[in-house]
């Protein structure tokens, strides 16, 4: 039981961290908060991570209910979500940005923590689909607890990176952050391929049994 918990926790932390595309989020955060005082930046980071966590938990448990309600199988959703995630990975590799969150808001928003920082910069369409799939795959209590703790840990790691964003910008520069985003995209593409191939294999197996 403990081994299952820790293995799920470690794999989930890594998965969720790359799903969040941390270096892209850092780049967007720097652009959105340019000129703001440190206290306000810290408040934005805290509210954005809390908002992302609440949405992530809802999605984590909503998968089975959603699939049952709309009458699709987990394997079918794996194929769709993995394909969408692959498009995001390609966008990260090509330009270092997510394909759905490349622009900044034109108007001055009262609060950028939830929109656009938490949604869609941190958690976009592809991330939503992946979280639904991962949540539905975890059945046993140790796996579920490990997955949830992995989500928390990944968001904490992202919060630390955002707090250090100024130092990261000085150390890596815009080019360095862009390169790190592209490397994240490569790893994300492998995760997307795994989701799609698992869905295809599961779909073929269920068809053969039927």
Image (spheres, rainbow, N blue to C red):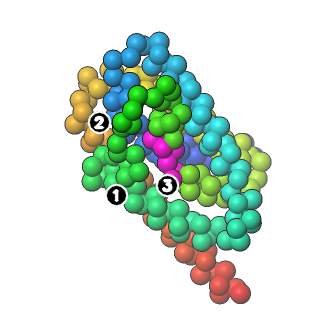
Label number found at residue 177: 2
Residue 206, percent across and down?
A: 67, 80
Label number found at residue 126: 3
- What residue is shown at x 55% (from left), y 24% (from top)? 46
Label 3 residue SS: helix
Q: Is residue 123 magenta?
A: yes
Residue range highlighted in magenta: 120-127
Task: Please name which of the two marks, 3 or 2, marks the residue nearer to the observer.
Answer: 3
Residue placed most toward the observer, 81 or 205: 81
In screen coordinates, is 175 left or right of 84?
A: left
Disc 3 residue crowd, few under 14, some 14–19, many 20+, Cα 10 Å: many
In screen coordinates, is 172 left or right of 114?
A: left
Residue 105 in sight from this viewpoint: yes
Residue 97, percent across and down?
A: 33, 46
Disc 2 residue crowd, few under 14, some 14–19, many 20+, Cα 10 Å: many
Label 1 residue SS: helix
Disc 1 residue crowd, few under 14, some 14–19, many 20+, Cα 10 Å: some
Residue 120, percent across and down?
A: 48, 44
Of pointers 1 and 2, the one earlier in the residue sequence: 1
Of pointers 1 and 3, the one earlier in the residue sequence: 1
Residue 207 vs 155, above or below: the answer is below
């Amino acid at each position: 039981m403990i081994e299952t918990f820790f293995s799920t926790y470690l794999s989930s932390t890594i998965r969720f961290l790359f799903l969040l595309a941390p270096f892209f989020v850092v780049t967007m955060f720097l652009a959105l908060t340019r000129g703001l005082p440190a206290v306000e930046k810290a408040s934005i980071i805290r509210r954005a991570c809390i908002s992302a966590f609440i949405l992530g938990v809802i999605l984590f448990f909503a998968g089975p209910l959603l699939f049952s309600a709309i009458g699709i199988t987990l394997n079918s959703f794996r194929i769709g979500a993995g394909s969408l995630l692959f498009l995001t990975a390609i966008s990260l590799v090509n330009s270092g940005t997510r394909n759905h969150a490349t622009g900044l808001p034109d108007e001055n928003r009262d609060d950028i923590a939830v929109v656009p920082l938490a949604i869609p910069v941190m958690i976009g369409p592809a991330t939503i689909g992946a979280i639904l799939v991962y949540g539905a795959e975890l059945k046993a209590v140790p796996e579920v607890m490990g997955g949830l703790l992995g989500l928390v840990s990944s968001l904490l790691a992202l919060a630390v990176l955002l707090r250090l964003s100024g130092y990261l910008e000085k150390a890596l520069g815009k080019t360095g952050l862009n390169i790190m985003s592209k490397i994240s995209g490569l790893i994300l593409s492998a995760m997307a391929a795994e989701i799609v191939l698992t869905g295809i294999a599961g779909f073929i197996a269920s068809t053969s049994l039927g």
